[in-house]
Each structure stands twice: as C-alpha cells, then as structure tokens.
Image (cartoon, rainbow, N blue to C red):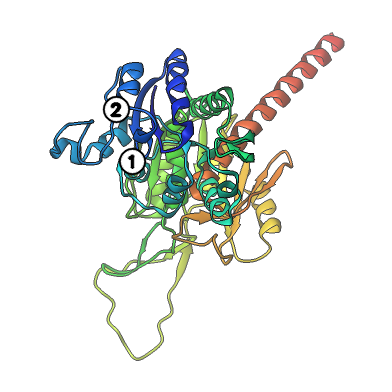
Amino acid sequence: MRITLGVTGGVAAYKAAELVRRLQQDNFMVQVVMTRGARQFITPLTFAALSGQKVITDLFAGAEGQDANLDSAIEHIAVAQRTDLLLVVPATADVIAKFARGIADDFLTTLYLASTAPVVIAPAMNVNMWNHAATQENIRLLRNRGVNIVTPDEGYLACGMTGPGRLAGEEEILAAVRDVLHAQLDLQGECILVTAGPTCEDLDPVRYLTNRSSGKMGYAVAEAAARRGAKVTLVSGPTALETPQGVERIDVRTAGEMHRIAAEQFMVSSIGIMAAAVADYRPASRAEQKLKRGKEPVNLQLEPTVDILAALAKNKGERVIVGFAAETERVAENARKKLLSKNADLIVANDVTAEGAGFDIDTNIVTIFARDGHEIALPKLHKAEVAQRILDEILRLREVLRTQRRSDLAGKLVAERSAS
C-alpha cells in the first residue's frame, strides 16, 4: 500500500525521517511531500535517501530543482489517485487551518483537496497555538469531515513551555495509520449493493415527479465500502455526482428500473444498503404528449411504486439489509416501525428539517436503529464519516446475528440429542 507523507514546517519535522523507516518496515511504500517551511528544518535529500522515492516540494515542479512542465502541473492529481492514505507529520497550525478552510496554495494542501483517501494528521505546535480557539475549531471541523487526528502529547516543548502540543509518539502515530488502513480492508470479500439518489416518475414527455435527494449519502457509503475492500455495485438514480473510484455504477431513472436492477444485484450480494430516495408514488398513466396548461384545476391520479426495501428484505436470508428513513416528525418512532415492517436489519434515520441534516448538503445528523435494539445517535458529521459509522454498525450487527445463529443451532442440536 502507498502512503503519502506530508511534512510541514515545525521543529518536529526531523522526527518524520524515522517515521519513514518504520512505515517501510510495515511494508508501506512512502512518498514524501514537503512544504517550504519543512525544508527550513530538514532537506529533501534526507527523505529521498530514506524512501527511495522522489520528494515533491513544489506544486509546479515535480521534485527539487526540476523545471515546471505539464506533468508536474497535474502531479497532485496523479499522487491523489494512487495514494491509499495521506499522513501529515508534523501538522502545523497553519496547514491544519488550510485543510479546514479549503485553501490550496502549495502541493500538500492541493493534494489534500484532490484526494479521497483517508487522512491522518499528527499536530505539533506551541501550547498556546494548540489551545487557541481557532485551532481547536479547525480540529473539530476536520474531525467532523472524517480526518483522523493523533492528539499531541503533553510535555516540555522546543519553545521552552510545557503543555499539550508536542508531537505524539511514533508508536501512537503508527497505530493510527494501521487502524485506519486495516479498517479500510475489513470488507474484503464482501459484495455490497448500494442504491442512491432520487427516482423520476414521468408524467408526460417533459414533466416528472421526483424529490430533492442529491445522492450524496449513498455515494459516500459506496465510496467508503470500496475503500474498505468491498466489491461495490451502485444503482443510482439521476444525479450530478461522479462515480466513486473502484465502484461499478448502474444508472436507472424510475423506481421500477431501480427495483429490477437492485433485485438482480442483491442476489449476488452479501450486504444491501438502500440509501436511495425512491418515489413512493408515480402517475397512474403517462401522457404521450405534453399536457397543455389550462384554466381549470387538474387532478393527478397516483399509484404506489414498489417498496424496494421490503421486497428485497422479504427473501434476504442471512444477508444484511439497511434502509434509510428521511423523516420530518417522530423520527425515532417512525424508524422503529420501519425497521420491523420492512424486515430490515438497520434503519438510518434523520430529520430532514434539521439544520445540517437536509438534502443536497455535505453533512448529516442521523440515528442508526438496529434489529437487536442497539441505537446510535450521531452528532452532525460529514457524510463520509456517517458512511463509515454505518459500515461499522453493519459489521457489529452481523457478528451479533452470526453468534445468535450459532447459539440457536447449538441449542437445536442439544434438543435433538436429548429427544433421541
């Protein structure tokens, strides 16, 4: 696996050199990206010799001393696409602020915006800088977006002060890297079906019924599952989103089309995650020509569409199936009812009227309801982080169900032996 190590301008930059060696001992390929400030503390040659890889130091020059060219101008995209994890050690208050606010003024910050790989940062700075409200706000913002923060240690600092801000220990940083990357592989061997986006139900050749779903939540789940090693098939209604890397996407338009494709894919899947906002009703008849405007009211007759979640869950066997509930009132009550009535294993519910939890935004506020009675209320998080928490809960519940089935089978065998 490939790790991109960002080194920024702090006294602790020299510690990143030893970290390169330790990462290589774990069989990671390491490429180093240095900021201008980092080069004031340690030379690119040191990292090149340790990593055996080109050290990137400039956005428009691929390596120290090289002239700018077309390849170097887009190299941040190439590095972003091939990295499995972006690790920043040490992370200064400056780079943390740039990450949080989306500023891209050098190779490292541009790479951060261009990459969809998981991110681990290990801050190191003066105690007052660490404790400053601006830094703490930026740390909270990055955590909410799914960035993994290795909290700095407390102790004597290079500035002569004592307190939090010292770079975390090497073992702690390595543990964070291993946890993130190993978690990314805990779905290897799984075939996961994800539905996402709205459906469109035609009224005439130019008009249709739909909803406000952007598909962002479902796409985040598909991307997270693929990064954790799963083979992911994404059945998507109409959206403007790009297909996540490593995901097979099948486009559909109507609820009927989505049901047909989803049913076919679920037959060869181990997990089904129904994140699509499927239209509950469609016009009972579709006009062949555009309906003309008139002066009288028009009554539109609707008929229900197929309930995809319930239809798939009816014959799920030992597969895990997850539904979503976008509610505007009595969220918990409605979610628990849906969990039972649809025969789902998990329901991810949210109040779409709540700030930070509605349609077409990057954050969500959800509660996950599981069939074993387990409930998790999550704070406002970036949808990428919500996706990870959903996948974590799927794995937890499946292990509970497997243990329960083994116990039931053992009890049945004991009963049969006793009867004989």
For the point 54% across and 46% down, the residue is 143
Q: Position of residue 339 (x, y in %)?
A: 65, 48
Residue 135 seen anywhere in this rendered image of the structure:
yes
Residue furthest to the front in view is 160
Element type at mark 1: helix
Amino acid type, residue under disc 1 in the picture: Leu
- Horizontal side of 189 relative to 257 (left or right) equals right
Q: Residues within 10 Å of mark 1 (few under 14, many from 20)?
A: many
Residue 254 x, y percent position in the rendering:
37, 55
Residue 310 shows up from this direction: no
Using the image as rendered, state which of residue 106 and residue 64 is in the foreground: 64
Residue beneath disc 2: 55
Kind of element beneath mark 2: loop
Between circles 1 and 2, the one closer to the viewer is 2
Residue 111: which numbered mark, if any? 1
Percent of width and height locating residue 351: 60, 61
